[in-house]
Amino acid sequence: MFNLRSSGTIGLIQALIACVFWGLMPVYFKLLQSVDALEIVGHRIVWSVPLLIVILYFRKNIGGLATALKDRKLRLAMFASSCLIAANWLIYVWAVHEDHILAASLGYFISPLLSVFMGRIFLGEPLSGRKWIAIAIAGVGVAVLAVQALDTLWISLALAASWSSYALVRKIADIGPIVGLTAETGILFLPFTLLLIWLTYVLPASPVTQHFGDDQTIDLLLIGGSFVTAIPLLLFASAVKKMTLSAIGLLNYLAPTIQFVVGVFVYKETITLSHLVCFVLIWTSIALYTTDSYLAGKAARKARSV
């Protein structure tokens, strides 16, 4: 009993650290404001590959990567997920640079609810009445935001759609989180390496944007993007094995909440009445959804113990 509780506590700490990492991500990318968003994503992908391979080596799972890439269906799934994650990262970094952190955080609030809806449509997963109501409330929240913030709503919806679609593909594909991310970044490695070479060495120098090699601090931050990508994923993947799914589900909303706070209080983004109403409705739908999940899990555990 002691070991189980201790393991759960360690898992909680790991998950909290991962969520704080993700929540403070806008601060990191703001430090790279002088670098084009596409170039940042390129470096994030290119530098992640050797780091992830080293991680797999020490976890003795290089063979898992090789086995996964031999499967044609899995390769196609990884190609699809790599395109989705690259698009998600690009939109997110661009949104942070353009002072749309609130819109980005809203996208990650909507995403889990959209994932539930996609699970029902594409995988036939059952939805209770409470979950349908939660999705409907979230839909109303998005509609309210469209009234006053239509120009940035596409950011939220694009992030939610790309991340939910990515989650759907990864759910279907039988591959672990670290092996999967290594495969995805590996697929993107060559095209983004060529892109970075072209941007850095072929294009003429720009007085507006910086490239790799222009500034040592910027170089370190661009390389550091690989650690910012891998560390929280490792922590969260480890935490999932030690915690209940209901607890993990609740923690999924910590990162966008931190992003919301950062956007409003650190970078002073304007929050309108539509934003407030939308976020209140989204949080209400999340509360309803998580309550239903908790009650369903409790009933299932009770049934097993009988």
Image (cartoon, rainbow, N blue to C red):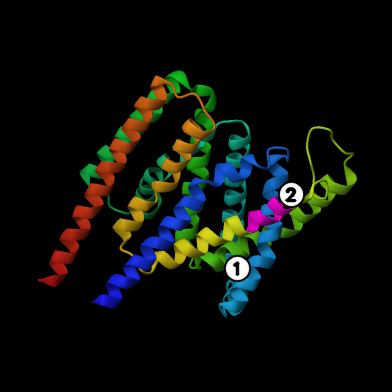
Question: Considering the numbered disc 1 on the image, is that residue within a helix, a strand or a loop?
Answer: helix
The spot of residue 63 in percent (x, y) is 60, 79
Q: How many marks?
A: 2
Which of the marked residues, 1 or 2, is nearer the chain's N terminus?
Answer: 1
Position of 112 with respect to 208 (left or right) is left
Residue drawn at 83 percent across, 51 percent down: 197
Q: CA distance from mark 1 to mark 2?
A: 41 Å
Question: Identity of the amino acid at label 1?
Answer: Arg
**Residue at the spot x=65%, y=59% of the render?**
185
Q: Main secondary structure of the magenta part?
A: helix
Residue 82 is labelled as none
Which mark is drawn over residue 72?
1
Near mark 1 (Cα within 10 A), the count class, few <14, some 14-19 or many ≥20, is few
Residue type at numbered disc 2:
Thr
Is residue 204 in the magenta section? no
Q: In the image, residue 170 lies at what x, y percent? A: 49, 59
Mark 2 element type: helix
Return the mark for residue 217.
2
* Furthest residue in direction left, as rendered: 306
Q: Which residues are magenta?
A: 220-226
Quadrant in which the C terminus is drawn? bottom left
- The vertical placement of 91 against 60, above or below, is above
Residue 139 in sight in this render? no
Picture coordinates of residue 148, whole percent (x, y): 45, 19
Marks 1, 2: nearer the viewer: 2
Vertically, is 101 above or below 10? above
Circle 2 crowding by C-alpha within 10 Å: few under 14, some 14–19, many from 20: few
